[in-house]
Amino acid sequence: MAACAGILNRWIDATPWMPRVHGHADVERYYEETVFAERRVIVAEEMNDVAGFLALSNDRFVTALYIDAPHRGVGIGSRLLDVARNLSPQELNLWTFENNRAAQRFYENQGFQVVRRTDGDNEEQLPDLLYQWQAREIEA
């Protein structure tokens, strides 16, 4: 739990446009009390190091997908999404911030499409995008 919260905290600290709404300890507490208690969390390890993680809610939302900086760009995010697709084979949804262009490119390359935009209807008060992936039916 602490390792996953640490990945998120480092991402927030390294992202100039991302406001810090909760302190490091609050993020760790949230991951312990909410994320790991209420969601399915898939953790990716590389050489005994937590490299990234994905949190999936019961209503088919990817509520977190973060890869630690030293492990980005090697396919970990794609593998985590593959696991999520196996757990929710019909549909996945997720939010990402409008400023997070790298995430948008990644999700679009993974077959997600924007289905909604907001002007900052979140605690960070940043514009964001709702993405959705749906399984394609194979025609007979």
Image (spheres, rainbow, N blue to C red):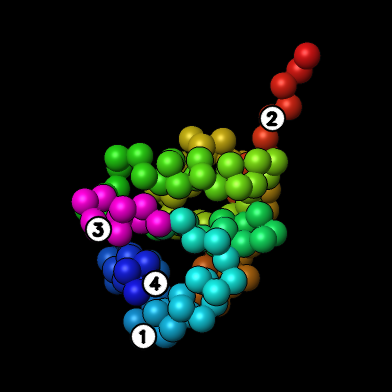
Q: Main secondary structure of the magenta part?
A: strand
**Residue, disc 1:** 25
Circle number at residue 1: 4
Marks 3 and 2 sit apart, C-alpha to C-alpha, by 35 Å
Q: Does the magenta-highlighted stretch encompass residue 60?
A: no
Q: Residue furthest front?
A: 48
Residue at the image point whose x is 52% and y is 71% from the top: 35
Q: Quadrant of the C terminus?
A: top right
Q: CA distance from mark 4 to mark 1?
A: 12 Å
Pick whichever of labels 1 and 3 is earlier in the sequence: 1
Magenta-highlighted residues? 43-52
State which quarter of the image contains the N terminus. Answer: bottom left
On the image, the x and y values in percent for residue 81 come to 50, 45
> Callout 2, which amino acid?
Arg
Q: Looking at the image, is mark 4 or mark 1 earlier in the sequence?
A: 4
The residue under label 4 is which amino acid type?
Met
Closer to viewer: mark 2 or mark 4 = 4
Tag on residue 136? 2
Say few, some or many: other residues with alpha carbon within 10 Å of mark 3 (under 14 / 14 to 19 / 20 or more).
few
Name the residue: 45% across, 47% down. 80
Q: Which residue is under mark 3?
A: 49
